[in-house]
Image: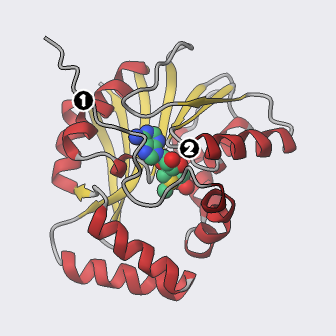
């Protein structure tokens, strides 16, 4: 029997990405402490997809990844719970002449995919909006929409257990130095209020969803990249 109890994805775990002012400021703020173009180039190189590939970007935000992939792939589904984020993605895609970005409002737990199965799914800094119980359900759903042998790239805040407190403090100090005190404070609030989890839990969740973890790296013991294949 399937439970009909559902997590409410419309309630933000941290910052309210439905707020248009937050959306407008997002890229400028993130580019102060992230090399977003470098991240996307590395993911593109690693996934090495054919030109007709169908790709999903879950929790796409302002769509930097979705738009970078749309320049190289067949179709990119940009999926997010926030209508304000998707309006921004649509506007940017139009401005950049990208007709192959399909914007769909929905969450990990509520999105219904009616297109072709994905060759690859990417998700960065979004899965931590769900508690672990719901992360498992989300990962099960993502695996179900991938082609057999399809690839999944996950980037998120994932904690290694060794030196955890020192690593968190170092991360807050580093992002504050790069992005200013409000960025440091947003990281502090993230750790205190959002649902980032431990690497050993995330890896168990991925494996139980039917993914083989091909590689895992950790930046500072707080940020992880997982490249996985649907087994
Ligand atoms: C920190 S932003 C990350 C955006 C982008 N992926 C990036 O790397 O910059 C988190 C995004 O996840 C979205 N989000 C939050 N909860 C979600 C859910 N349950 N399902 C899908 N997207 C969600 C938010 O609306 C927001 O756009």
> x, y percentage for residue 132?
21, 45
Q: Is mark 2 within 8 Å of ligand 1?
A: yes
The quadrant in which residue 116 appears is top right
The quadrant in which residue 30 appears is bottom right
In this rendering, would 192 be left or right of 90? left
> x, y percentage for residue 46?
52, 45
Quadrant where the image shows the C terminus: top left
Q: Residue at position x 20%, y 75% from top?
A: 164
In this rendering, would 184 be left or right of 2? right
Comes first in the chain, label 1 or label 2? 2
Identify the residue under disc 1: 209
Q: Is mark 1 within 8 Å of ligand 1?
A: no
Q: Secondary structure at mark 1?
A: loop
Q: Secondary structure at mark 2?
A: loop
Could you classify mark 2 by the number of other residues whose Cα lies within 10 Å: few (under 14), some (14-19), or many (20 or more)?
many
Identify the residue under disc 2: 60
> x, y percentage for residue 167?
27, 79
Total label count?
A: 2
* Residue nearer the viewer, 155 or 63: 63
Quadrant where the image shows the N terminus: top left
Q: Residue at position x 42%, y 36% from top?
A: 152
């Amino acid at each position: 029997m399937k439970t009909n109890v559902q997590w409410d994805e419309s309630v933000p775990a941290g910052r309210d990405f439905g707020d248009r002012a937050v959306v407008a400021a997002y890229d400028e703020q993130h580019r102060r402490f992230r090399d977003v173009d470098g991240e996307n180039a590395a993911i593109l190189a690693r996934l090495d997809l054919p030109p007709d590939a169908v790709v999903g970007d879950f929790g796409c935000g302002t769509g930097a990844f979705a738009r970078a992939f749309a320049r190289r792939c067949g179709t990119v589904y940009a999926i997010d719970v926030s209508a304000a984020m998707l309006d921004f993605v649509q506007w940017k895609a139009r401005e950049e002449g990208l007709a192959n970005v399909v914007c769909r409002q929905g969450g990990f737990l509520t999105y219904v995919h009616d297109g072709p199965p994905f060759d690859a799914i990417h998700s960065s800094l979004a899965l931590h909006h769900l508690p672990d119980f719901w992360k498992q359900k989300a990962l099960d759903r993502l695996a179900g929409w991938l082609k057999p042998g399809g690839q999944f790239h996950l980037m998120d805040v994932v904690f290694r257990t060794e030196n955890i407190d020192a690593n968190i403090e170092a991360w807050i100090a580093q992002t504050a130095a790069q992005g200013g005190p409000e960025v440091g404070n947003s990281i502090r609030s993230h750790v205190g209020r959002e649902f980032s989890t431990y690497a050993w839990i995330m890896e168990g969740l991925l494996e139980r969803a039917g993914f083989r973890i091909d590689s895992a790296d950790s930046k500072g013991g707080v940020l992880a990249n997982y490249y996985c294949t649907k087994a």
